[in-house]
Image (spheres, helix red, strand yellow):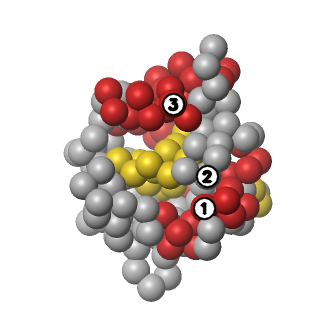
Amino acid sequence: MADSDIRDIPLTTIDGASTTLADYGDGAVMVVNVASRCGLTPQYEKLERLQEEYADRGFTVVGFPCNQFLGQEPGSAEEIKEFCSTTYGVTFPLMEKTRVNGRHKHPLYASLHQVPDAEGKAGRVAWNFEKFLIAPDGTVTRFRPSTQPDAPEVIAAIEQALPAQ
């Protein structure tokens, strides 16, 4: 699938509505597979800060709850929404629980698997909180789970992807 088509892949929100990444505007989108019971779960706070800081410039974080890594996202849609809202004040959109690896992975993640990280390694999502920044021109930058959302390289990539103020 061409990068330019990535924004048109059908998705389902956590509330069951049909959507695509294109529905979140033509700015930059950060796709993140998230989990509520992971050592990296505090990244929600930094992701929300990015959302608040850059939303007015056309940036959106989109969270994809995933239960494929040691069952660290076991909750229902309602439980996930409540946890994200009450614990971290999450306002960015969440999708339905999504498979990011394996034979039945979501088509979005099948496309994202082709994107190499900074070391040139593509393939499977390593763990919860792997981040993919999709620029308006379709360029995708991959950040592995241990890279914090507010790391200098992430901020630089977001700034480069968004129009100058």
Please determine whether, in this image, residue 1 is positioned above or below residue 92.
below
Residue at x 64%, y 25% (from the top left corner): 163
Secondary structure of residue under mark 3: helix
- Residue 137 in picture, x, y percent from top left: 64, 47
Disc 2 crowd, CA 10 A, few/some/many (<14, 14-19, 20+): some
Quarter-wise, where is residue 155 in the image? Answer: top left
* Residue 138 image label: 2
Quarter-wise, where is residue 11 in the image? Answer: bottom right
Q: Is residue 30 left or right of residue 147?
A: right
Please determine whether, in this image, residue 71 is positioned above or below residue 102.
above
- Residue 114 in picture, x, y percent from top left: 44, 69
Which residue type does callout 1 highlight? Asp
Q: Is residue 81 left or right of residue 132?
A: right
Q: Are marks 1 and 3 in contact (CB under 8 Å)?
A: no
Mark 2 or 1, nearer chain start: 1
Residue at x 40%, y 80% (from the top left corner): 102
| Viewport quadrant of the C terminus | top right
Which residue type does callout 2 highlight? Gly
Secondary structure of residue under mark 2: loop
Mark 1 or 3, nearer chain start: 1
Front position in the image: 90 or 2? 2
Q: Which residue is mark 1?
A: 3
* Residue 160 image label: 3
| Viewport quadrant of the N terminus | bottom right
Q: Are marks 2 and 1 in contact (CB under 8 Å)?
A: yes
**Residue 150 seen by the camera:** yes
